[in-house]
Image (tube, rainbow, N blue to C red):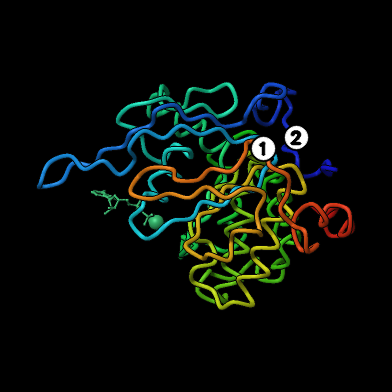
Amino acid sequence: MLTRWLRVDTRSGEPPSPQSGGSGPLIELRGVVKEYETAAGPFAALKGIDLRVGSRQFVGVVGRSGSGKTTLLNMIAGIDRPTRGEIYVGDTAVNRLGEGELAVWRGRNVGIVFQFFQLLPTLSILDNVMLPMDFDGRLSVRAQRERARRLLEAVEVAEQADKLPAALSGGQQQRVAIARALANDPPLIVADEPTGNLDSQTAETVFALFRRLVAEGKTVILVSHDPDLVGKVDRTISLSDGAIVEAGALDAEPAAADGTGPARLAAADVAPVQRW
Ligand code: ADP
Ligand code: MG
């Protein structure tokens, strides 16, 4: 169950984020092509991607370096635009939004987690987490601060709130980045190699955080070149040379037969989940 405080409470009574519109997919890509201009002419990093992702799924995207994983994530998150094709998230045709609209949409609807955390080095941890709420402008500064503290508590780095990012370990910085991604309570979290710069034990704890988010109702798309990802997520999408070579089923059951995956987590780990 979602706990109420994770919701962004706005005075207008406006829903915090668009829903996927009933039983349809949260994300749909149709014929998405992305060409980069290079000295040798246009290079197609995505060669016509058709994909549907249901809400509340934990989706892993795997493939070799250069296969197009980051490009695909950037299309879905509205960080970059397709050369051709359509991208829907909920009821929004993301590829049709203008620049300003896209920035507002992204701020409310997508939480983004990067390999190298990308916290702003001159801002405190607390201010880093408040920043997306500040841009969004729906909450008072006091409410932003309160929410940022609670998010930092939820990812267990609240004691670091007044420090600068450089004072934290990599694992702590990535927890802060996850708190920041949750700031505006987006339905969708995308993460590009989020554990790629962490030791394996720290990577496990960060990965477990993503599982908690899925158990709490988020859709998480996580890119990794770690082959172990298969079996830890609900569904794996494999990319090769800008094309999907394997996509799993839209309504795939959680793959966690060993009890370590998201299906069991929701039932077995109620106390930490409720802290979200
Ligand atoms: P991955 O994340 O799987 O390593 P990317 O999506 O980063 O792959 O890149 C896919 C392909 O597109 C690669 O061949 C890469 O060199 C190329 N590419 C990525 N970004 C650009 C760019 N801005 N300009 C030209 N080529 C690019
Ligand atoms: Mg990449």
Q: CA distance from mark 1 to mark 2?
A: 8 Å
Residue found at x 73% / y 49%: 254
Q: Residues within 10 Å of mark 1 (few under 14, many from 20)?
A: some
Q: Nearer the viewer, residue 59 or 130?
A: 59
Asked if the residues shown at circle 1 and circle 2 are in contact, with their CB atoms under 8 angstroms apart, the answer is yes
Residue found at x 45% / y 34%: 103
Numbered tag placed on residue 139 in the rendering: 1
The answer to whether the residue bearing label 1 lies less than 8 angstroms from the nearest atom of ligand 2 is no
Q: Secondary structure at mark 1?
A: loop
Residue found at x 52% / y 31%: 105
Residue 9 in view in this figure: yes
Q: Amino acid at mark 2?
A: Asp
Q: Quadrant of ligand 2?
A: bottom left
Q: Nearer the viewer, residue 77 or 127?
A: 77
Numbered tag placed on residue 38 in the rendering: none
Does 250 sit above or below residue 170?
above
User: Is residue 226 shown left or right of residue 203?
Assistant: left
| Residue behind mark 2 | 9
Q: Quadrant of the N terminus?
A: top right
Looking at the image, tell me whether mark 1 or mark 2 is earlier in sequence order.
Answer: 2
Residue found at x 70% / y 23%: 14
